[in-house]
Image: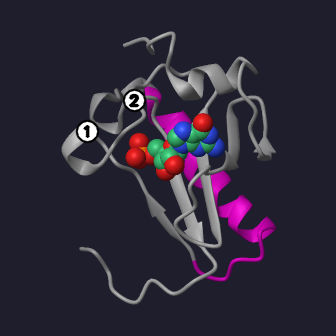
Amino acid sequence: MEYDKDNIFAKLLRGEIPADKVYEDADILAFRDINPQAPVHILIIPKHAQIRCLGECTEAEALILGKMNVAAARIAEQEGLESFRIVVNSGTKAGQTVFHIHMHLLGGREFAESII
Ligand code: 5GP
């Protein structure tokens, strides 16, 4: 399903709002979260795939989802993180607020407890 034209990350991809970019390739853009929950808090989004949330993804999107994970690992390395946490919120009740699929890369502090 297509993104809402007012979607904040779609606007960011169109260059209508600024982003503190840390990584970009043909498929992916990564930028710092505006409200960081850790010293390193980076959001990783697909540039072209129209996926509102992980719960709505299809088999055809497996490659871009894999690329987002690989990019997260490379960015963690680039940021000097030995350990890091990846979070993907899917759906309102899981805390998703922006309906343009994104992965949170968090690091630079201890996450003492696992949340699962
Ligand atoms: P969600 O709650 O949907 O999993 O995550 C959305 C994230 O987007 C939040 O962590 C929020 O701080 C971040 N965010 C919302 N608006 C902006 C923005 O305009 N720029 C950036 N860099 N991050 C944003």
> Contact (CB < 8 A) between labels 1 and 2?
no
Q: Is residue 95 above or below residue 61?
A: below
Q: Is residue 67 visible?
A: no
Amino acid at the residue labelled 1: Gly
- Horizontal placement of 92 versus 46: left or right? left
Q: Is residue 112 above or below residue 58?
A: below
Which of 112 and 34 lies nearest the eye of the viewer?
34
Queried on whether the Cβ of the residue with tag 1 lies below 8 angstroms from ligand 1, the answer reads no
Question: Which residue is at a point 48% across and 62% down the rendered structure image?
Answer: 86
Q: Earlier in the sequence, mark 1 or mark 2?
A: 1
93 inside magenta stretch? no
Mark 2 lies on residue? 99
Question: Which residue is at a point 65% across and 73% down the rendered structure image?
Answer: 39
Queried on whether the Cβ of the residue with tag 2 lies below 8 angstroms from ligand 1, the answer reads yes
> What segment carries the magenta color?
61-83
Residue 115 appears at what percent x and percent y? Answer: 28, 75
Amino acid at the residue labelled 2: Phe
Residue 1 appears at what percent x and percent y? Answer: 36, 13
